[in-house]
Amino acid sequence: MSSTKVSPALVSADEATLFSAMNHKQTFGHVMGELAEKSDDLAVVVSDYGRRLSLDGLRASRPEAYVQCGIAEQNQIEVASALANEGFHTFAPCYATFITSRVLDQVRVNLGMMRSPVALVGVSCGCEAAMLGASHMSLEDLAIMRMIPNLEVIAPADTVELASVLRDLAARPRPAYVRANELDGACLHASGASYAPGAAQHLYVPAGVAPEVAIVSTGTISSRAVDAARILGERGIAAEAIELASVKPLDTAALDALCAAGVRLVVTLEEHSRVGGLGGAVAEHLAERASTPDAPTPRLLRLGMPDAYLEADSQQALLERAGLSTEAIARVVAERL
């Protein structure tokens, strides 16, 4: 499906059991702790939020690797970039909306133009922090970050895959934005995980029949893509679920393969605005493909959050109102066919 070769497993099956019992903040802290034990070159730069990221192990074993900038996210990016430019393997975690929107100029200059190899980690993304209001919801971050040249944009589907992404970024430092949140608690990588930029993964394939629908998802809402594909199969509609953890670079070869296989409808699914995120990236590629003579191109349905600032509410309630429950996803796909 993908033209990009995925590296050997970065998280083993045994480790998958460990990480699947953690939330994304615990996973981040655990991986940072293990990296600190293996390398003297790790730097974790935080802006006040560090105490919520399970970094006690890191601070105990390597206190000099932990840099606290206070409530000053723009300074956080400058400090992180300076350390990265000096050879440190640098991670900068914070609320997703603050580590993307509030620091856009610093990210654009340092990570985009200067290519400082900093891994930004946006926690509590999407609607996870929705009880704190629109200011803490991160529904534009994928669109913002994928517009910056030289910046990789990644949205893991679960904590197992998140651990593999963090390990890969530590082994091969580069400018990147990693999006993380909690949803439904599903583990989609129980046998382990690897990560390579621009590589799609099959999460669900119908048995014995060619799919007529492809649900292409990114992030933890991918679990609902799998469940919706199964529901559609029970209703006589063959559907497959494909994960694009790498939003940028995008696995365009995987999309072309779907087109060549005769899929009638491509559905994008994300806990992000329908504008500019995964749906926007896929739409751009399919539009270019459609302009090529004799290139079969299926219809596109983009599912995501509305283009609006939402009132404070629970994550589940907002997703329900946006039509992103598993049942609602399956229903609208069937209707569009």
Image (cartoon, rainbow, N blue to C red):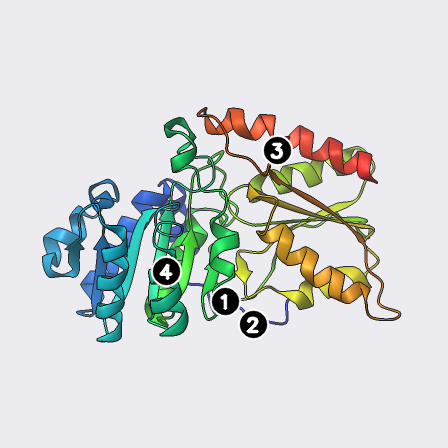
Neighbour class for label 3 at 10 Å: few (<14), some, many (≥20)?
many
Mark 2: which amino acid? Lys
Q: Extreme right residue here? A: 294
Frontmost residue, 152 versus 156: 152
> How far apart in space, not on screen, are marks 1 and 3 (Cα)?
28 Å
> How far apart in space, not on screen, are marks 2 and 3 (Cα)?
32 Å
Q: Quickly name the residue at label 1.
A: 196
Q: Quickly name the residue at label 2.
A: 5
Give residue 95's position: percent from left, percent from top: 34, 44
Q: Earlier in the sequence, mark 4 or mark 3?
A: 4
Q: Nearer the viewer, mark 1 or mark 3?
A: 3
Res. 191 visible in picture = no
The image's mark for residue 105 is: 4
As drawn, 82 above or below 154: below
Say what secondary structure mark 3 lies in. Answer: loop
The quadrant the N terminus occupies is bottom right
Q: Quickly name the residue at label 3.
A: 324
> How far apart in space, not on screen, are marks 1 and 2 (Cα)?
7 Å
Mark 4: which amino acid? Asp
Frontmost residue, 240 versus 13: 240
Q: Which of marks 1 and 4 is in front?
A: 4
Say what secondary structure mark 2 lies in. Answer: loop
As drawn, 41 above or below 239: below
| Number of numbered labels in the structure image | 4
Say what secondary structure mark 4 lies in. Answer: helix
Give residue 48's position: percent from left, percent from top: 20, 44
